[in-house]
Image (cartoon, helix red, strand yellow):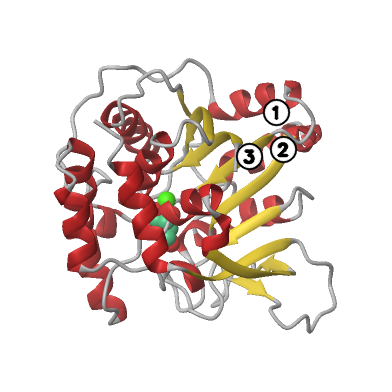
Amino acid sequence: MHHTLIIDTDPGADDVIALLFAMAAPEALELQALTAVAGNVPLAKTSRNALLACEWAGRPDIPVYAGAERPLQRTPIYAANIHGREGIIGVDVHEPATPLAEGHAVDYLIRTLRTAPERSVTLAMLGPQTNLALALAQAPEIVRGLRELVLMAGAHFNGGNITPTAEFNVFADPHAAEAVLKCGVPITMLPLDATHKILTSDERIARLRGIGNRAGVIVADILDAYAPQEMQHYDMPGGPVHDATVIAYLLQPSLFSGRLINVEVDSREGMGFGQTVADWHGSLKRPANVNWIADGDAQGFFDLLAAHVARLP
Ligand code: BDR
Ligand code: CA
């Protein structure tokens, strides 16, 4: 499957793994740029971490644009307790050699999607969806240039990971998620329902480390630090690699299964704030707006990830 791709991201430990994965597949994923957003940690760190991912992948040529510093309406929240103070738990960070691209990520998205051929660009979204929501508000016609949105976002059968019902990326900016879900572009969502079924094991991490390159060590170091806290909190046998499932979906959608359903976001203050209301059984008879992924082939995912990480420096 070939995609002209932009990745919007808030690195983030699992974001970094997703970015390395994507940059290892240049024949399938023609990566135009990364757009960074505040999320797991503040924007200065997410945009720096995006540059570091490019450096580690040997792709400093990929432009990284910094975008929204805060959500549309709600008070900013971060997840440094999970991803570490610098946003990449398990790995030392440094100042990247390459600077950020000039200009704001939202301007980049508008400029690029306005002039792109009709339905040509896939946008992978690995963090809160603030950048695209801002771009849509300023220039709604940009939907023409979009082929598909693939989001790591939401939770239904699994329950949430930041509140009992809400998943972090949606909870961090529910108003942005609402705008994106209504935009009319085909959307695939990889929610916690799927990502909590695609889990690390000691053997899977050891295989990544055993590749013997720098990228394999980085991915293994991140997972060794990130997985245990998730395993403990959710009593799971391994840790998820949330955002990397988006890249696996782009490369090999047959690894995943889901259903076209209606999904809406609760953006009212209260216990349901940031919840994705996923109408799996079609009870509301509302039009389907999301391909909701409910399951995935875990071994197939880790085989694909390892094969790609092996291509990196
Ligand atoms: C999502 O939240 C972030 O902490 C992760 O990077 C991922 O995008 C999982 O809920
Ligand atoms: Ca993320």
Figure quadrant, ligand 1? bottom left
Q: Nearer the viewer, residue 165 or 294?
A: 294
Q: Is residue 18 above or below residue 102?
A: below
Which residue lies under the disc numbered 1? 113
Quarter of the rendering occupied by the N terminus: top right
Residue 143 is left or right of residue 83, and the answer is: right
Of marks 1 and 2, which one's residue comes earlier in the chain?
Answer: 1
Q: Is residue 114 visible in this depiction of the protein? A: yes
Residue 263, by quadrant, is bottom right
Q: Is residue 168 above or below residue 12?
A: below
Residue 38 screen position, x and y as percent: 43, 42
Residue 138 is left or right of residue 91, and the answer is: right
Residue 159 screen position, x and y as percent: 48, 78
- Which element carries disc 2, helix, strand or loop? strand
Q: Looking at numbered disc 1 in the image, what kind of residue is underneath it? A: Leu
Q: Looking at numbered disc 2 in the image, what kind of residue is underneath it? A: Leu
Report if the CB atoms under discs 2 and 3 are less than 8 Å apart. Answer: yes
Which of the numbered marks, if any, corresponds to residue 146? 2
Quarter of the rendering occupied by the C terminus: top left
Q: Nearer the viewer, residue 303 or 108?
A: 303
Residue 75 is left or right of residue 139, and the answer is: left
Q: Tell me how far mark 2 sits from mark 3, CA to CA.
A: 6 Å
Q: Looking at numbered disc 3 in the image, what kind of residue is underneath it? A: Thr
Residue at x 32% of width, y 34% of height: 53
Report if the CB atoms under discs 1 and 2 are less than 8 Å apart. Answer: yes
Which of the numbered marks, if any, corresponds to residue 122? 3
Residue at x 56% of width, y 53% of height: 151
- Which element carries disc 1, helix, strand or loop? helix
Of marks 2 and 3, which one's residue comes earlier in the chain?
Answer: 3
Which of the numbered marks, if any, corresponds to residue 193? none
Q: Residues within 10 Å of mark 3 (few under 14, many from 20)?
A: many
Give the foreground label among 1 and 3: 3
